Image (cartoon, rainbow, N blue to C red):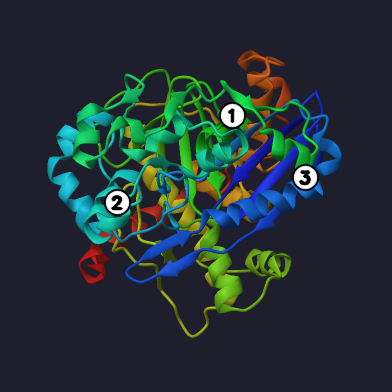
Amino acid sequence: MYLGLDLGTSALKALISNDLGNVVASASASYDISYVDNNGTEQNPSVWLDALDEVLRELKGYLGEVKALAISGQMHGLVILDKEDKVIRPCILWNDNRTIEENDELNQNKEKIYNLTNNISYAGFTLPKLKWLAKHEKDNFNKISKIMLPKDYLVYYLTGKFVSDYTDMAGSLLLDVKNRCYSKEMLEIANIKINQLPRLLESYEVVGIVKDDIALKYAFNKTKIIAGGADNALAALGTNTLEEGTCNISLGTSGTILIPVKEAKQLSSYGLHVFSHIQGTYIMGCILSAASCRKWFLEDVLKTTNYLENETEMLHADAKELYFLPYLQGERSPHNDPLAKGAFIGLSATTSRGDMSKAILEGVSFALRDCLEIVRQEGIGINNLTVCGGGSKSKLWCQILADVFNLEVKTLVNEQGPAYGAIILAMIGDKKITFAGVKTLVKYGDVYKPQNINYYNIKYQYYKKLYPTLKKIFS
């Protein structure tokens, strides 16, 4: 058996498969985000350990047969430990926007940074967080002995090994993506030393065996820990998005569009990321709010958790003249604007909650198309599109994506792409399968063909004008 863990923004999800890759058990444990002043978001790593304890206890009956496990993790978070291996402060998360000033300072030399890392700086990346910490929490910065990303903290807890992988570290702005090594110049900019950073491994390499005390507690039996990877890279693995021409959209708290390429290339636009993949490289656009927009509207505004009823409401909705900008946490791709705000445009006295709900799905889809348009401008073709994440459970949303993108959209039998990608990675690390065998494990669900292409092309042209018009108001 194999265990895949996905350390997400709001929950830790676990899947167990048999040796054929069929999921036989699952568990999850949720936790909250702490919102602090000035657009800050944090989580204490202790809540991840509590969640890990909860899912492992629930799955304990299977763990003695688990040969290997791998972890997928939310990217960019800054976890810092002191010389006694104690967590110095809560993790600063990927959607934290307190680093606006530091981010702007870094991007005054964006050409240099891009040449060193294949990326410019974004407020959510790890390096701007380090710069912010050095300025605003100098005592904490001076205590740093180890710098980790979220999933690496769990690997350290399970094995005692201080390691990371290329896919996750690519989002730190400390990695030379093209040469797959730390950038000496970027470390100097961050004012950190290389011995404060984890040793880099390929995602599928074996880190070690579960520590004796943890193995005894949860009944592991010499289980191998694989290095693991960034959630987006493992979602791509879990959806067989590994070759050029394939594309995966993930509709989670954030939304991503990921397209593999053979090697790191410099794009003509700074609007997208170029990150290390499990093999090779990928281009990615990331919008900071996706399925979280729908969750916000239903649960926080309408005070309901009845998603099924809302799905029915949207089937009869008319959002023709209604638009939604999904910038509830600022925006990353392609605008790189932490000050951007969400907005409904076109409300009238007859607007229903179904209309507003549908406009949210369309707005998120349009924001993802903003990223796709840059990919198309680079001359990169897409002929195979999958969608995963919680948002993919909505049939209407999948159809809207097919219409907005003018591409056939395939869902998966198991929508938990990152957790299943972690299972596949564990199997590869254990030499149970090779990368060539991944396609035999991924099982597709429903297929959605484009229908309302002209309607959404016209509506998207109006949508594109909204952010440039409102940008001055946001700032």
Q: Name the residue furthest bottom.
A: 349
Q: Residues within 10 Å of mark 1 (few under 14, many from 20)?
A: many
> Can you identify the residue that label 3 sits on?
26
Closer to the camera in the image, 455 or 213: 213
Q: Tell whether label 3 touches label 1 (CB within 8 Å).
A: no
State the residue at coordinates (26%, 67%): 470
Q: Earlier in the sequence, mark 1 or mark 3?
A: 3
The spot of residue 347 in percent (x, y) is: 44, 77
321 relative position to 334: left or right? right
- CB atoms at circles 2 and 1 under 8 Å apart? no
**Which amino acid type corresponds to the residue marked 1 in the rendered image?**
Leu
Q: Residue type at mark 3?
A: Ser
Quadrant of the image occupied by residue 101? bottom left
Q: Secondary structure at mark 1?
A: helix
Q: Which residue is mark 2?
A: 141
| Residue 160 in the image: above or below residue 263 | below
Q: Which mark is residue 237?
A: 1
Residue ranking furthest to the right = 61
Q: Secondary structure at mark 3?
A: strand
Q: Which residue is the extreme one toward the front?
A: 84
Which numbered dot is residue 24? Answer: none
Question: SS class of the residue under badge 2?
Answer: helix
Q: In which quadrant is the C terminus drawn?
A: bottom left
Quadrant in which the N terminus is drawn? top right
Tag 3: Cα neighbours inside 10 Å, few (<14), some, or many (≥20)? some
Q: Which sits earlier in the primary sequence, circle 3 or circle 2?
A: 3
Residue 408 seen: no
Label 1 vs label 3: CA separation?
19 Å
